Amino acid sequence: MGPDAFRTAGLAEALAELGHRVTDVGNLQISAESLKDASIEKIHQLPESAVWIQTISQATLAAAKFADIPIILGGDHLIAAGTVPALASHASEMNQPFFVLWLDAHPDMHRLTTTQSGNLHGTPIAYALGCDGFEGSYPPLLARIDPKNICMLGLRSVDPAERALIADLGIDAHDMRAIDEGGIKAPLSRFLERVAAENGRLHVSFDVDFLDPDIASAVGTTVPGGATFREAHLIMELLHDSGLVTSLDLVELNPFLDDRGRTAQLMVDLTASLMGRAILDRPTRAA
């Protein structure tokens, strides 16, 4: 129901008002006939998840070739196991480096052997990095992402195995304490400068739980202390100003937990900010 909630909140209309031509290709489906017996004890819905990853990956590749900025709507954050490798593969075809801005309370860097919950929405980045343990369970990886090309903002729920992997791989990760101490603009600006310097393609993967639950309650994995309304809008506006974003995930919106559609509307407003909506024009001033 998450993608339909974005539609109901007027995502396409908001983008069209900004002058973008929007094509909604509809929801994806999988069939029972496509499921294989790939179950692992304590891992939830592995056969279904593997087929979803394959389906989303193929659709994302097609969208990347069709649209200037494909926007992929979830569902939970497992969709990134399909979107991120597919977009990395497309970037390779374009002969450009691929970068990921991960806006999430969680790094989602569990392997199948380290997850304690068995919930596969905690695995997409580990899979996209090419970590061991996914062979034979997830589809063959289309393209591996470089850990040096990931920036994570807003972390505040990180398990020990994920923390160790972040440190081992040298991922540019910023928890909310770092943001509270130094602000959100500096780490984002440094990352965007790198993307621009390397002529990279930038994918933004935006989980509702990046936001503080006081302003975005419609998510099943709320973690207190998330990004504020002003911080989130600043990020979106800086991303727009950079002109670097080439694709976007919007995930984890649960309309059954929403209060009169407020979270869905906030996510639409933030997406509109990323795509060009501004309160005031800010002309460049001579020094």
Image (tube, rainbow, N blue to C red):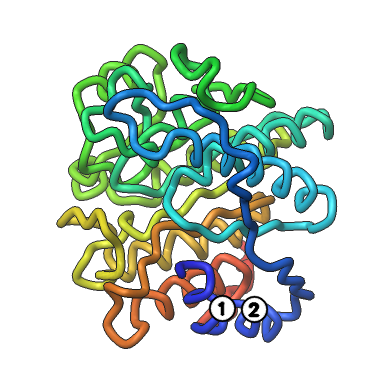
Q: Position of residue 250 (x, y in %)?
A: 50, 59
Q: Looking at the image, which residue is at 30% across and 77% down?
A: 258
Q: Give the residue type that dot 1 points to.
A: Arg
Q: Quadrant of residue 43?
A: top left
Front residue of 236 and 84: 84
Residue with the mark numbered 2? 12
Where's residue 22, x and y in %?
74, 74
Place residue 111 in its image quadrant: top left
Disc 2 packing (10 Å; few <14; some 14–19; many ≥20): some
Label 2 is placed on what type of residue? Ala
Q: Residue at x 28, y 42 (%)?
A: 155
The answer to whether residue 287 is visible is no
Query: Would you say the residues marked 2 and 1 are in contact, meaning their CB atoms lie under 8 Å apart?
Result: yes
Mark sitting earlier along the chain (2/1): 1
Residue 228: % across, % down:
27, 65
- The residue that disc 1 covers is 7
Considering the image in quadrants, where does the C terminus appear?
Answer: bottom right
Question: How far apart are the alpha carbons under marks 2 and 1?
Answer: 7 Å
Is 27 situated above or below 11? above
Give x and y (percent) for residue 229: 32, 70
